[in-house]
Image: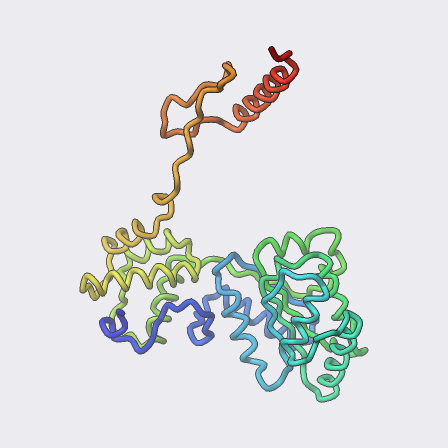
Amino acid sequence: MFLKFYGLREQPFGVTPDPRFLYLSRGYREALASLYYGIDSERGFLALIGKPGTGKTTLLFHLMEKFRGAARTAFIFQTQCDSREFMRFLLTELGCETVGHDFVRMHDEFNKLLLQEASAGRRFIIVVDEAQNLDRSVLETIRLLSDFETPRAKLLQIVLSGQPELADKLASRQLSQLKQRISSLSGLAPLSVEESSSYVNHRLRIAGYSGDPLFTPEAMHLVTEFTEGIPRNLNNFCFNAMSLGCAMRQKLIGPDLVEEVIGDLDMKKHLTELPIAQPSPFGLSGVQPAANPSEESLSPDDAKAYMRELTGQLSAWKRKPQA
């Protein structure tokens, strides 16, 4: 373990979304502010979009911390479900019994909770993570949950968080009513080289590191290029780089060590090779095996032509009288 070697109190590049390690770049700060003011102003529906690994869940945990004690919250992760299962997940998250309840009864139970919190002067916030997996019918169910409101305010604040496929769904004509209700749409972009460096240094400081930057500027350029500036990828890469650095007794991580880690993590070298096409037993003409075994044997068009001719020859063979 490299913690002692680098003078750390805890693991700086863990795999859980710990809000303590949240690095607020300009883009992340803007997204957090947009979500916070949207909820604080009771705007109803909000959305957060970002590629996998950009830190959406960590940002949402940080957001929920700001409303701790002032709101009833539910955080939903199970999104491959139908409408009834979604309501069951929601009520279970809120501490309600759902065994044997049908959809109508669960909906009534939720309405009671909503009115109770409104009477107590507390906000009610639902965060749905990985919302790109939700079926359109479930998204419509969520939209209907937001119908409860007073003449002055929305009783329920809903944050939909997901990958870019969520934006595709929200832009579809079938969900036009839901799209119209989303008052704020925030996006998280990958980090630049400078932001990636600040992100890594920030996490190291939170974990107890002190001293000069652990990664050289040249190394950080390589790291950012390989990880595409995605925080989850940065965490994984830095863990491996520090593990190797510790094994090699290197206090400073430079480009040579980074290149070695890139080689270790490169998935391409582990891919299986494509099989080489064999000549057709039916004497197929016009499609030849690849001249170079390292190249792909057939193009998509050649493959289609091969299958059409093969199907024709099989049909002719079946029609041929047998001796």
Q: Taking 59 as reference, is 44 left or right? A: right
- Provide residue 233's location: percent of width, then percent of height: 41, 58
Q: Taking 206 as reference, is 49 left or right? A: right
Residue located farthest toward the left when viewing the structure as drawn: 249
Residue located farthest toward the bottom when viewing the structure as drawn: 120
With respect to residue 34, does 180 lie above or below?
A: above
Q: Which residue sits at x=76%, y=59%? A: 177
Q: Which residue sits at x=27%, y=69%? A: 1
> Which image quadrant: the C terminus?
top right
Q: Taking 114 as reference, is 228 left or right? A: left
- Provide residue 152's location: percent of width, then percent of height: 78, 79
Q: For residue 134, which quarter of the picture?
A: bottom right
Q: Which residue sits at x=60%, y=19%? A: 314
- Provide residue 155's location: percent of width, then percent of height: 73, 78
With respect to residue 40, does 26 lie above or below?
A: above
Work out whether residue 74 or residue 106 is closer to the camera in this orientation and state it: 106
Q: Taking 66 as reference, is 7 left or right? A: left
With respect to residue 253, does 207 lie above or below?
A: below
- Provide residue 254's location: percent of width, then percent of height: 24, 58
Q: Which residue sits at x=37%, y=55%? A: 224
